[in-house]
Amino acid sequence: MPASRRLIGLSYSPWTEKARWALDHQRVEYAYEEYLPMLGEPLLRARMRTLRGRVSVPVLLEDGEVYADSFEIALRADALGRGPRLFPEGTVEAIRTWNERAERLSSAGRALLLARLAEDREAQRESLPPWIPRGARSLATPLAATAVGYLARKYGATARTRADLEETMREALHALRGALQERTTILERFTYADVTMAVALQLVKPVADRYIALGPATRRAWTHEPFAAQFGDLLAWRDALYERERGPRVVG
């Protein structure tokens, strides 16, 4: 493994999961580093050589190059990989369209999630770093609340109404349902289009813990109950896709 190929991410983040799935599918070896929101931003900026503007993870650092977006990382994985291509010839623009749809779904879902997290102290406690001792976690919960507020400001989570956010999610979910119908993949075979839409469903209801581990309060907060009931067929498709296509992680 090239010592310089390092993925920085958040283990619970759908955006990180998309990048890891692509790298793992293509059996690209990499070191993984967990990012700490707020506190880790100055170092991330330095490593990305970015002084201004918003920075976020995942970020892939490789031989001095910076890949700062899940889609870019997936394309890089395909260029390096040894598995079946996630971007078959002639499909990149179609997959890009599905990725943009998944981004809208995920961003709207994140805004609703952050609103739920702001009201859920148990989920806030679960989000604290594991190195904080159990006895100190209640006292440290305000740190988690501060992090939730920071993320809400960073991503403009309060700028839109709940109805508007839900409509954005609904449009993407209906588009996915229409594309699948009796199919098991969005395009002719498994591609990154399936990855990006399947992972976006994390903001409707999280996938099983063996894929992305979440505490019970966190899992509850991530579940958007009205859509989890309405789009159970899409969740079943997502779960089957994970079983069939999400292989083991290359690194920790």
Image (cartoon, rainbow, N blue to C red):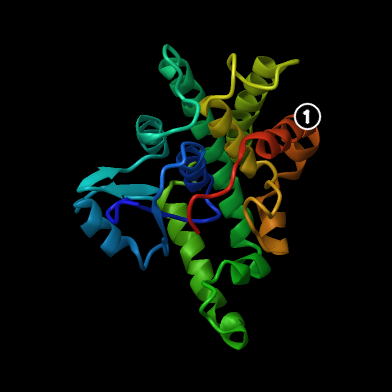
Identify which residue is drawn at 68% across, 47% down.
206
Q: Nearer the viewer, residue 159 or 230?
A: 230
Residue pictured at 52% horizontal, 56% vertical: 11
| Residue that protrudes farthest toward the bottom in the picture | 135
Confirm whether residue 116 shows in the render: yes
Q: Position of residue 209 (x, y in %)?
A: 69, 55
Where is residue 244 drawn, in percent x and y? 68, 34
Q: Quadrant of residue 4?
A: bottom left
Residue 10 position in % (x across, y down):
48, 56
The x and y percentages for residue 27 are 46, 41
Left-right relation of 1 to 171:
left
Which quadrant of the view contains residue 163? Answer: top right
Relative placement, left or right, of 54 versus 245 is left
Circle 1 crowding by C-alpha within 10 Å: few under 14, some 14–19, many from 20: few
Res. 54 in view: no
Relative depth, front residue between 57 and 142: 57
SS label for mark 1: helix
State the residue at coordinates (48%, 60%).
149
Q: Amino acid at mark 1?
A: Asp
Give the residue drawn at x 62%, y 53%: 212
Task: List the residue tagged with mark 1.
Answer: 233
